[in-house]
Structure formats: C-alpha cells, structure tokens
Amino acid sequence: MIDTHTHLYSSKFDEDRAEAINRAKENGVKQIYLPSIDQAYFASMEAMEKADPDWVKLMIGLHPCSVTADNDTEMEFVKSQLASRPFAAIGEIGIDLYWDKTHLEEQKAVFRQHCDWALAYHLPIIIHVRDAFEEVFEVLEEYRKTPLTGIFHCFTGGKEELDQVLSLGFKVGLGGVLTFKNGGLDKTLALYESKEILSHIVLETDAPYLAPHPHRGKRNETSYISLVASKLSEVLNVPLEEIQEKTTQNALDLFVAY
C-alpha cells in the first residue's frame, strides 16, 4: 500500500517517529508522500526524505490555512523550491473556509498560482477542501481543458461532488473518515460500480489527524492505512488484495517519480 498523504514530520511524532515508520513498513506500506504546509515545516520534511529517499517522497505548496493577506514570502519559497529540486506533486493546496473566511480571495489567488505551476512543471496537485467545494470547483473549471490533474485529499463529499471530481479527471483520497459510523462515504461509494470507482481512489491517512475506527479521536499514524483498505474492501465488495494493488497503482500512475 501507499499512504498518499501523511504528516509524519509533525511534532506529534517527535517521541516515536522511528517506531511509527517501522510499524507502517511492517503493515505493508511501501511508500509515503508528505504534503507541505508552509516553509516552517520543510526542513523536517527534507530530513525524513534524506533518511529514507526511496520510501519518502515530498510535495511542495502552501496550505490554504497558512494563507494570509501577504503571501509573497511563502510563495517565493515554493517557486524557488520547484525550480531547484524535484517533487512528486504540488500540495497540499486548495481552499478552507471552515476556520476563517477572511482571506477567500487570497486563497483563490494562491490556488490558481499553484495550478499554473503544476502545469508548468507537469505535476499533479493535492487539494485540501473544507466547506469550499463550490469555490474549489469554480477555480478548477478554469483549468478543465488543460492536463491538470491530482487528488481531492480526504474526500468527504457526496455523489454530486464526487461526480464533479471525476468529470474533472481527478482522483479521491480516502482515509479514516471512510470508517466512521456516520461518515456517509460508504453510502456514496455504494452508488457506483465497484471496479469503475476503484480506478479513481487512492488511500491516505492524513496522520496524525482523522484516525480510523477503532482509534478515532487518538493520534493517527500511517500503519492504520490497513484499516482504511479493509473498510474499502468491505464497502466495494472487492478482495483486499485487489484494493491494495489497484490503489497503489493509481498512486504510482499519478505522482511524478523522482
């Protein structure tokens, strides 16, 4: 399996990062992808990559919750990194209106700039969207006729949103929310033909956030991706081995190898 979205560089793992990595590998995780938040975290991301470059792959981008009234310094950092080294994707980027709606226009502008960079560098984008599907789709419609593609990370929408994601040529990242009793994702996925929808799914944890059942409310970690895979197998009525193989291949087909 591949964890397409984990913040293992978070301070939440400072006491046992090595152990968490070992547990993930023992649970069959063959690779992880680290999404960027802002430049304050980047040294920690690179340290993980340097320690295990075949297992750890990096993205670059400015998280929407880090967008402010003035993003010049952060965006210049992203621009310079893109020009100086390889990345697997641009992310996580997008729009978040859950915590604060103050900087919506700035979030849109930053999102568009990342999309332009993604096209210039032939990279997929990893989208964070919270209480902002309409706004994210508004921006992405501007790129519909381009090769822009990527993942809607931690997808929590319904059929209407999923149909639109698929029509844009994007994949969905499924994590712990799939295992939540009243999450609703299982019912949404059940509306599709299993083999067809599976071709658009990748697995993720978003560790240390959104731990799957039975660990809900506790620190999440990459090893728990096996619980997400098992739940997806149950929901789609597809053998676990096929879930593991197909979601892994979906990820490898999307991310840029380096």
Image (cartoon, rainbow, N blue to C red):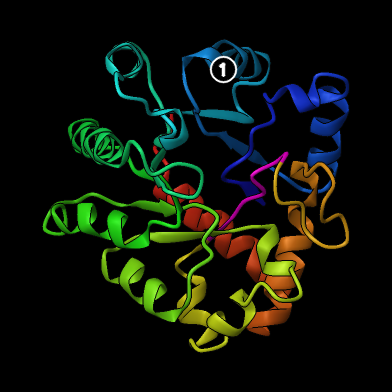
Image label count: 1
Report the quarter where the C terminus lies: top left
Point out residue 57 in the picture as x, y percentages from the top left corner: 54, 29
Chief secondary structure of the magenta portion:
loop
Q: Name the residue type under label 1.
A: Tyr
- Looking at the picture, does residue 116 appear above or below residue 10? below
Q: Secondary structure at mark 1?
A: helix
Point out residue 60 in the picture as x, y percentages from the top left corner: 42, 26
- Looking at the picture, does residue 84 appear above or below residue 223? above
For this view, does 16 lie left or right of residue 96?
Answer: right
* Residue 190 quadrant: bottom right
**Which residue is identified by label 1?**
41
Q: Residue at x 31, y 37 (%)?
A: 107
Point out residue 63 in the picture as x, y percentages from the top left corner: 44, 33
Point out residue 162 in the picture as x, y percentages from the top left corner: 41, 72
Q: Residues within 10 Å of mark 1 (few under 14, many from 20)?
A: some
Residue 158 part of the magenta segment:
no
Q: Nearer the viewer, residue 222 or 238?
A: 222
Q: Residue at x 80, y 19 (%)?
A: 14
- Looking at the picture, does residue 170 appear above or below residue 222? below
Q: Nearer the viewer, residue 174 or 72?
A: 72
For this view, does 182 lie left or right of residue 149?
Answer: right
* Residue 34 quadrant: top right
Q: Nearer the viewer, residue 88 or 69?
A: 69
* Residue 95 quadrant: top left
* Residues rendered magenta in the picture: 202-208
For this view, does 184 lie left or right of residue 228?
Answer: left
Q: Residue at x 54, y 65 (%)?
A: 156
For this view, does 198 lie left or right of residue 209?
Answer: left
